[in-house]
Amino acid sequence: MAVTEAENPLVGEITCGSLLQKLQEIWDEVGESDEERDKMLLQIEQECLDVYKRKVEQAAKSRAQLLQALSDAKLELSTLVSALGDKSFISIPETTLGTINEQLAAIAPALEQLLKQKEERVKEFSDIQSQIQKICGEIAGNASEQTGAPAVDESDLSLKKLNEYQVKLQELQKEKSDRLHKVLEFVSTVHDLCAVLGMDFFSTVTEVHPSLDDTTGVQSKSISNDTLLRLAETVSALNEDKKQRLHKLQELATQLIDLWNLMDTPEEERILFDHVTCHTSASVDGVTVPGALALDLIEQAEVEVERLDQLKASRMKEIAFKKQVELEEIFARAHIEIDPEAAREKIMALIDSGNVEPTELLADMDNQIAKAKEEVLSRKEILDRVEKWMSACEEESWLEDYNRDENRYNSSRGAHLNLKRAEKARILVSKIPGMVDTLVAKTRAWEEDRGISFSYDGVPLLAMLDEYAMLRQEREEEKRRLRDQKKYGEQQNTEQEAIFGSKPSPARPSGTKKVVGPRANGGTNGTPSRRLSLNATQNGSRSATKDGKRDSMKLAAPANFVAISKEDAASHVSGTDPVPASP
């Protein structure tokens, strides 16, 4: 019954007082001593203190954790704001008011938003840095060695820093584009060069880098410094090879043309090698036809040159005589006298003896032709002046005949043309002394420079000019004598008229008129028998080629160097006629 009553209070509200009362009742029922009771109560109080103490410690610890969390949140918030570098992006709450939990609750949304923004910003930085790393790897040539995403510096995630990375990325993208453009240009150049040289483009370009194959995408091609350098070296090597092959082909083409010309090869045989001779004067950049400089084409040309060389050896006499004819024509145009028969006999003797190689003989003749052309160039100025001098002498001869013609002023057909020609001829004849003086000076300078005599068709030109000057002086003296004779005859007539009076002279038959001066000895067209040439076998007149130019001259100069006017001729006739007898 007592136990039931004691348990009843437990049915209701349990408190520390009710429990203490219950404990005292138990002690009373048991008969616990006061000492034990005091000891038990002290123990209870100590245990209560321990519980409170633990609870306080737990509460303090919880508060410290909350404060640390608040401090960490504030630090993280400050770090995020500093890293993102944009305080105006979100509103930062005031964290110095309210309880700790209230402060944490206020910071949490902003912190969450900043963390989300940081995550997005880190992703942007990672993407840009990955692209930068990839392009840098492509430029450096070690893109395949790079693994993993680049580390992002989370201490600076500002838009300014992001913009710097974007600018850098754009610069690298532009550099990549430029490099790719260069690579494609190099590849295209290699393709064209390989086509012209007849080389395998695939093996050539993949030897530089496997990604340069046509089957590889444009963006996948290597743009590294090493690739660009090797491409540049490949292009340079191909260009040098192209230059050497073109030079070789041009040499072969020149040899082919020379051999064809030597042996009069028909046109149908020459056409077979048009692909070789068409590049005779082409520049390196001008040869773009695929296969134009292929090795097999050059070898084909070499074989043909070798074949023609062998054929040339068998036709040596014919070719050598052909070159001799060319040499003789050059000397003839230069009015240099040679002995062609002796030269031909020498060529025959050399070929028949077999002591000289055909190529050496032809090379020697080519050398002679080259020297002859040089000699022609050195004589050109003097020969041109000789031509002008001789043309002037021809005009002088024509003018003399014209002045002797008593019907020259008649209104016959072509008389006005002859009158104009006579006017021009008189002007040209007046220049002959100056022509001769200049020609003498030029000839002497030429002879002093070379130490040999300048010959014109085997006759020393200075001797011709000296004889011309001497003959011209004789003509002048003859002219003065005729004038003096005319004056003397006029004086005699005047004296007779003063003594006997004026009386007409009896008419003379027209056929008794005497020829003026040296033309009494004349031949055809009044040409005198005396020649300026010192070689009596060279008398004659100059011949002209089909184009109208004179290519040979046996007569050094016309003899009638002084034109005698109509009045002089008349005075000569008057001076030689007999004086009429007085009645």
Image (tube, rainbow, N blue to C red):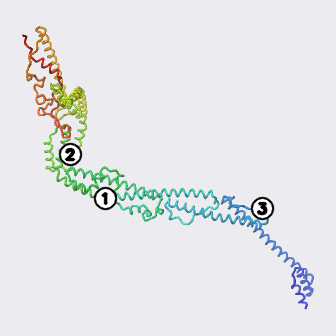
Q: Quadrant of residue 561?
A: top left
* Location of residue 526 in the rendering, given as x and y in whole percent from the top left corner: 13, 28
Earlier in the chain: of badge 3 and badge 2, it is 3
Tell me what residue is drawn at x 13 percent, y 50 percent. Answer: 352
Q: Residue 583: percent from the left, percent from the top?
A: 6, 10
Q: Residues within 10 Å of mark 3 (few under 14, many from 20)?
A: few
Q: Quadrant of the N terminus?
A: bottom right
Question: Camera-side residue: 57 or 466?
Answer: 466
Residue 105, x across and y down, in percent:
75, 67
Q: Which residue is nearer to you in this view: 564 or 108?
A: 564
Query: Where residue 159 is drawn, which disc sits there?
Result: none
Above or below, 456 against 45 in this view is: above
Residue 519 in sight in this render: yes
- Do the residues under discs 1 and 2 have CB atoms within 8 angstroms? no
Residue that sits furthest to the top in the current view: 499
Query: Who is closer to the viewer here, 286 or 130?
Result: 286
